[in-house]
Amino acid sequence: MWDCHCHLAQVEDLPARLESARRQGIHGWLSCASDRASWALQRELSRSPGVLLAQGLHPWYAEQGCEGLEKFVTEAVAIGECGLDFYRARDPEGRELQKLVLRQQLKLAKRWKKPVVLHCVRAHQALLQEMDAFPEVRCMIHGFLGSPADAQAWLRRGDYLSLGPHALSRSDLMRHLPLDRVLIETDAPSRGASLLDLRPVLEAWQQVQPLQPDLFQTNLFRFLGIERGMAGGRQFKG
Ligand SMILES: [Zn+2]
């Protein structure tokens, strides 16, 4: 199983945590950046087997700016976590800053042909509007908890929706989302989640409909545009 969105650079006692996750059948992680300090920490992690990197700047840290991000992006399989969080930024200035930093990262995505991992809180319409300028950029909406109408709008773009521990009760999504566009994640260690919180998401989904755990790996690799065999250990380049 692959954890399609987490933040390994922030997980304490990481080697032991990865080992217990492996014992539960989790053998791959798309580890996403958060603030500027995480970029170099993430790069160190890329030597661990089964770890792929997304490098970017989370909207919570928009004021830190993206300068210097490009060289980290060239080594990563994706850009992120970036996006818009209008719950966090309530004033127009804060929201404009988030949009500015997002656009800079979407330009990098276009230039380097990388998919993007998006954070979206109370901002689906604004984020979809931003993406209109980048029709060629593929996205994953991580921690998706939106309405069926929000889901349809992303799916029409050709994007992917990732469900985490907070979607355990969203059997409506699990029942109706197209199975070739869905992913699962823990977002650990955000909001107290652990790397072991992946299996409950899989099991909740399996209660709604029969599906194989490797479905999510297939979808993740299609989203990333990489071959299955190429993510066995070392960071995939280019
Ligand atoms: Zn996250």
Image (spheres, rainbow, N blue to C red):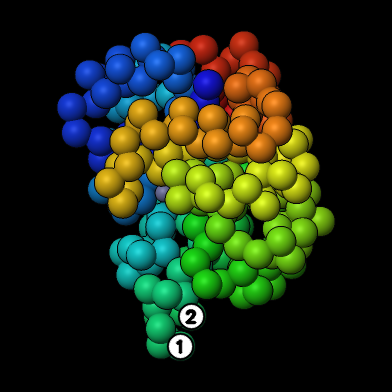
Q: Residues within 10 Å of mark 2 (few under 14, many from 20)?
A: some
**Residue 172: percent from left, percent from top:** 67, 52
Q: Looking at the image, which residue sits at the far left?
A: 13
- Residue at disc 1, secondary structure: helix
Residue linked to disc 1: 92
| Any part of residue 76 in sight | no
| Any part of residue 122 in sight | yes
Q: Residue at x 76, y 62 (%)?
A: 153
Foreground residue among 60 and 162: 162
Q: Is residue 85 above or below residue 8?
A: below
**Residue 134: percent from left, percent from top:** 71, 60
Q: Residues within 10 Å of mark 1 (few under 14, many from 20)?
A: few
Residue linked to disc 2: 96
Q: Residue at x 65, y 74 (%)?
A: 125
Q: Is residue 107 above or below residue 123?
A: above
Residue 193, quarter of picture = top left
Residue 220, quarter of picture = top right
- Residue at disc 2, secondary structure: helix
CB contact under 8 Å: marks 1 and 2:
yes
Label 2 amino acid?
Answer: Glu
**Residue 237: percent from left, percent from top:** 54, 25
Give the total of numbered labels.
2
Label 1 amino acid?
Answer: Pro
Foreground residue among 205 and 18: 205
Q: Residue at x 62, y 75 (%)?
A: 126
